[in-house]
Image (tube, rainbow, N blue to C red):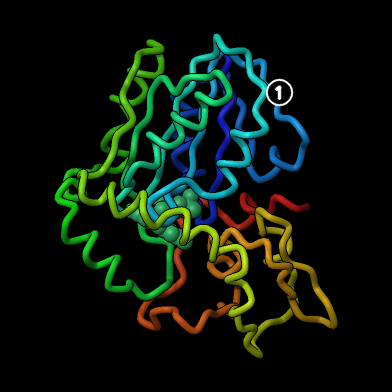
Amino acid sequence: MNTTIFYFSATGNSLNIARNIADKLGNCELIPTAKAIRNEKISINASRIGIIFPVFAWGMPRIVEEFVNKLSVNNKAYIFAVASCVAIQGNTLKDLKKALRTKGLDLDAAFAVKSARSSLMKLNKLDNIIIKLDQQRLKIKTIEERLPEIINIIKKNDKHKPETSSWTANIFGSMFHGMAVKTFKNIDSDFVIEDSCTTCGNCVKICPRNNIIIIKNRPEFQHNCEFCHACIQWCPNFAIKHPKFDIILKQYHNNAVKVQDMLINT
Ligand SMILES: Cc1cc2nc3c(=O)[nH]c(=O)nc-3n(C[C@H](O)[C@H](O)[C@H](O)COP(=O)(O)O)c2cc1C
C-alpha cells in the first residue's frame, strides 16, 4: 500500500512526526504542503493519504485549509491526520474532517500530539483562560509515546475519531480561531529587521508562503504571512522580531530537523 504524506512544518515538529510515521509505514512519499498548494489542483493517486501540520490559534493553519480546497482525490483513499500542538488542539481535527467532507472525502483517523512550543508571542489573557480551563491538555502525549499505537491504527486502515480538547477550550477556540488567523496575514507589517541581518536569504528560502523578497539588501514581507515563525526561528542571527515577542523565549527548532530540510524554495 502506498502512502503520500503532506506535511506543513515551521519549526520541524510536524516534519519529524511525518518522518517517524513514514519510516514505520514504508513505501511513503513526503511532500511539503506549502509546495503542493502552489498548484491549481492537488491530485493524489496514493491509496493512503496523511496530513500532518501544527495547530495555529486553536485551529488549522490557513495553508492547510487551502490545501484541502485544492484536493482532488480518489474517494476510496484512507485519510489520516496528525496535529502537532503544545497542548491545546481545540476542534482542529474536527474542522479538518468537516473541510474534507465538503470535498466528498472522509478523515478516517486523526490524532493530536504534544510537541514543543513554537510561538514566541507573549500569552494574552484569553490564552491563559483557555489554558486554565482545558484539563484535557494534561493528558496529551508526544509522538514518541504514541507512535506504536498510531502506526497500528493506520496500518490496519482503522477508524479513529478526531481527538479534541475539553469542551470549554473548544468553544473559545472555535470562537477566536477565524479571527486570529485573519490577523496573521498582515502581522508581518509589525516585523522588525534588526541590524544583525546579513541578508543570507534563509528566510526567503524557508517561507512556506513565498512571502519574503529581498529589496535593497533587506528582507521585505508581502503581507501574505502564515505567522508560522519559520523565518524567525531559522534566522541564523535571530534578526526578525515582533514587538509582542516574549523576550524570555529563545529560538526553537526540532532537534531531528536541520535547516537544509526546511529550504523548500530552492
Ligand atoms: C501562530 C501560532 C499559533 C499556535 N497556536 C497553538 C494553539 O492554539 N495550541 C497549541 O497547543 N499550540 C499552538 N501553537 C504551537 C504549535 O502548534 C506547536 O509548537 C507545533 O508543534 C509547531 O509545529 P511545527 O514545528 O511543525 O511548525 C502555535 C504556534 C504558532 C506559531
- Tell me: residue 257, above or below residue 205: above
Residue at image mark 1: 43
Ligand 1 within 8 angstroms of badge 1 C-beta: no
Amino acid type at mark 1: Ser
Image quadrant where residue 182 sits: bottom right
Please tell me which residue lies in front, 59 or 254.
Answer: 59
Residue 229 horizontal side relative to residue 146, left or right: right
User: Residue farthest to the front?
Assistant: 175
Q: Position of residue 153 (x, y in %)?
A: 34, 18
- Tell me: residue 196, above or below residue 24: below
Q: Is residue 3 visible?
A: yes
Q: Position of residue 212 (x, y in %)?
A: 73, 66
Q: Position of residue 101 (x, y in %)?
A: 50, 24
**Residue at 19% across, 52% down:** 134
User: Residue farthest to the right?
Assistant: 216
Which quadrant of the rendered structure holds the N terminus? top right
Q: Residues within 10 Å of mark 1 (few under 14, many from 20)?
A: few
User: Residue farthest to the bottom?
Assistant: 195
Q: Quarter containing ligand 1?
A: bottom left
**Residue at 53% across, 19% down:** 105
**Residue at 55% across, 9% down:** 76
Residue 135 horizontal side relative to residue 41, left or right: left
Residue 137 horizontal side relative to residue 10, left or right: left
Q: Position of residue 4 (x, y in %)?
A: 59, 25
Total numbered badges shown on the rendered structure: 1
**Residue at 21% across, 44% down:** 167
Q: In the structure shown, which secondary structural element does the residue marked by tag 1 occupy?
A: strand
Please tell me which residue lies in front, 72 or 168.
Answer: 168
